[in-house]
C-alpha cells in the first residue's frame, strides 16, 4: 500500500472539536506506538483563520485581522482527509515533537512558536489556500 499521509501534507480534520479545519502533518506514525496502537499523525492546524483585509484598512486593523490561532493534536489516520496541497515545514519539525504533549507548559510554548511561523507565512503571502476557511 502506498503511504500518502507524509509529513508536510495538508489534511482536513474530519471529527472532533477541530472538524473541518485544515492542518499540516508534522510527523506520522504508521504502525502505532506503545500508548496508541493505531496509525496516527502529529498535526499543527489553524483553529481561527485570519479575517479578510481590504486596501482602505489601516495598519493597526490589518495587523489585528492577520492573527492566526493554531492548534496541535495527535490524530488517528481515520479522522484525516489528505489534500493535494503541501506545506514546507523544516522549522516546524524541531518545534513539535511527541514530548511537547506531555506537559501543558510545553504545549503552550509549541503553540506560540507555531503561531509565529504561521503568521510569518500568512503575511508573506505563501500558501494562501491553507489560511482560508473551508466553505461547506
Image (spheres, helix red, strand yellow):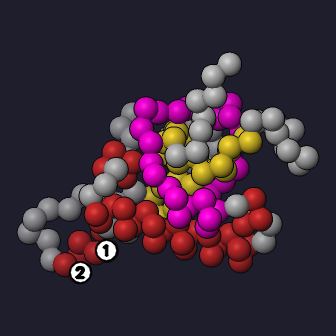
Above or below, 52 against 29 in this view is below
Residue that extends furthest to the bottom in the rendered view of this protein: 60
Residue that extends furthest to the left in the rendered view of this protein: 56
Q: Nearer the viewer, residue 127 or 103?
A: 127
Residues rendered magenta in the picture: 72-96
Give me the disc on residue 60: 2
Residue that extends furthest to the front in the rendered view of this protein: 90
What residue is at 34 percent from the left and 50 percent from the top?
127
Residue neighbourhood size for the residue with mark 1, other residues' Cα within 10 Å, grouped as few (<14), some (14–19), many (≥20): few
Quarter of the image with the N terminus in it: top right
Identify the residue under disc 1.
64
Is 14 inside the magenta-drawn segment?
A: no
**Residue 81 locus on image (x, y percent):** 55, 32
What residue is at 23 percent from the left and 80 percent from the top?
60
Q: Is 36 situated left or right of 60 in this image?
A: right
**Residue 107 locus on image (x, y percent):** 68, 69
- Residue 71 visible in image: no
Quarter of the image with the C terminus in it: top left
Residue that extends furthest to the top in the rendered view of this protein: 1
Task: Check disc 2 and report its element: helix, strand or loop.
Answer: helix
- Residue 22 visible in image: yes
Amino acid at each position: 500500500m502506498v503511504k500518502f499521509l507524509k509529513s508536510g501534507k495538508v489534511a482536513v480534520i474530519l471529527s472532533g472539536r477541530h472538524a473541518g479545519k485544515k492542518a499540516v502533518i508534522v510527523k506520522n506514525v504508521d504502525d502505532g506506538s506503545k500508548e496508541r496502537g493505531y496509525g496516527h499523525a502529529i498535526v499543527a492546524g489553524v483553529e481561527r483563520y485570519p479575517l479578510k483585509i481590504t486596501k482602505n484598512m489601516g495598519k493597526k486593523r490589518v495587523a489585528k485581522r492577520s492573527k492566526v490561532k493554531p492548534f496541535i493534536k495527535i490524530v488517528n489516520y481515520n479522522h484525516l482527509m489528505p489534500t493535494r496541497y503541501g506545506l514546507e515545514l523544516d522549522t516546524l519539525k524541531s518545534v513539535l515533537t511527541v514530548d511537547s504533549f506531555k506537559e501543558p507548559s510545553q504545549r503552550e510554548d509549541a503553540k506560540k512558536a507555531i503561531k509565529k511561523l504561521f503568521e510569518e507565512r500568512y503575511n508573506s503571502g505563501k500558501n494562501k489556500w491553507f489560511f482560508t476557511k473551508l466553505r461547506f
